[in-house]
Image (tube, rainbow, N blue to C red):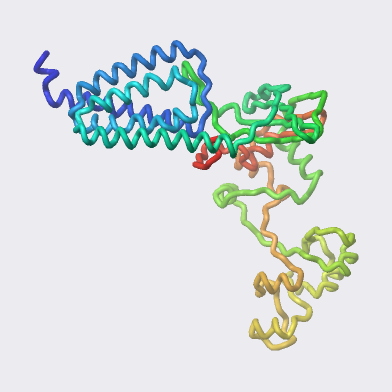
Amino acid sequence: MKSFFANVWTKRVLAIVSVLYVIAVFRLCYFSLFYEIHIHRAVSQCLILSSVSLLALVVMLYTRKQIITRICSFLILPAMLPVVLLYFGKWSMMIPIIVTGVVILLLSGAGEGAKTALGTVILLMYIFGALGYFLFTSFFVTSADETVVSSGVSPSGKYRYRVVNTMDTSKGSTAVYIEPNDADKKFTFATFTLKHMEKVFDVKRPICEDVEIKWETQSRSEITEKLNKTSENIIVHLSDKDIEKIGYTRTSHYVLSDIPTEKKKYLGLKESDLSTVPFSDISEDVLKKFNIAKDESGSYCLIKATKEMCASLGVPEGSKVYLRDLNTSQLKSCHIAIDDNIYLRDLNDHQLELLGVPATGDVMLFNGEVCFRYYVAELENYFDVDSRKISIDILS
């Protein structure tokens, strides 16, 4: 048995334990950056984590002269810096790992000079990291007097909400916050919830004395019909990948833009209206008043192009000039713009299904008014639980 533990290959194999332990510490570091932690049973968690850390420490001390263990002994404490700052106060989780990191750093097989230098660097990292975090949270993160008056989960269990009253100098406000309920990482002793997934869907001023939250289950086709009745110009923001998925061909439509005040009357607009008007909604007779005509093939052209425009296009003065041959600047000079947006009215039910909109889902009514539709949340990808972005927001 003695020869077995003295064998160098036994030590090399067991050194893998230090790698696994460090991977777990880096995983915790990752969680601290992107997740909030909620510990359920602190004592039980501390006992189990202490046992695991003690076992890992014994193995790392046994294999401390292996290069893998030496490298791992230098990584534990730096990886724990974000955990200490962002999960400050969760001592039952942090103390066993930090003690393990300190002990293995001091007793690792590295030379005294290397340990002293690395120990000094790590200490300075903690000092300046804590100082910077304290200054940021003190000066840039504002605190508010908030009271949660209602909270719960949607009927499908996919979303959770809370209604918050916030007191301020303007008689306060009542806001509805919603976040995904299926993006949590659940473990035996703790649950991790994604940071900054919560979005505000309604804000009312002043504070609402009575709050009524009602959930309904509505179908995809029902919501589509309601939205299109509300407006036929609802724009859907899709990525190129989504457009390809639904087999949609992005087409360009001409619209009148920056319409001169004196010509708005031809379109039935008021002088204060700033709307763009699609060519498809304008009769040919009205288009002629804007120097625009449609030829036999259905292509739009200018009735009379300016001398400068003909010269820039290299065509004789008086020639027919098609809009497709004009650049953005030239179109703008004629009060024309290109609209290549994708509108909800142009998407059918099958395409919406391909975009990930379920057949039925949750709709929230806040004091009798629609506040949230699962349909829009899925279509606009409000809750992109797979995205991870490093920003200063993670410190708040």
Count of marks placed on residues: 0
The N terminus lies in quadrant: top left
Residue that appears at 39% across and 13% down: 48
Q: Left or right: where does residue 361 sit relative to residue 8?
A: right
Farthest residue to the left: give it: 3
Residue that appears at 82% across and 29% down: 368
User: Is residue 241 depicted above or below 169 in this figure?
Assistant: below
Q: Residue 231 location in percent, x, y? A: 79, 47
User: Is residue 280 depicted above or below 157 in this figure?
Assistant: below
Q: In which quarter of the image is residue 211?
A: top right
Q: In which quarter of the image is residue 152?
A: top right
Q: Left or right: where does residue 379 sit relative to residue 14?
A: right
Residue that appears at 24% across and 29% down: 69
Q: Residue 363 location in percent, x, y? A: 72, 31
Please tell me which residue lies in front, 321 or 39.
39
Q: In which quarter of the image is residue 321?
A: bottom right
Q: Residue 377 location in percent, x, y? A: 66, 38
Q: Left or right: where does residue 107 sit relative to residue 94?
A: left
Please tell me which residue lies in front, 110 or 117.
117
Residue that appears at 29% across and 23% down: 103
Q: Left or right: where does residue 131 sit relative to residue 214?
A: left
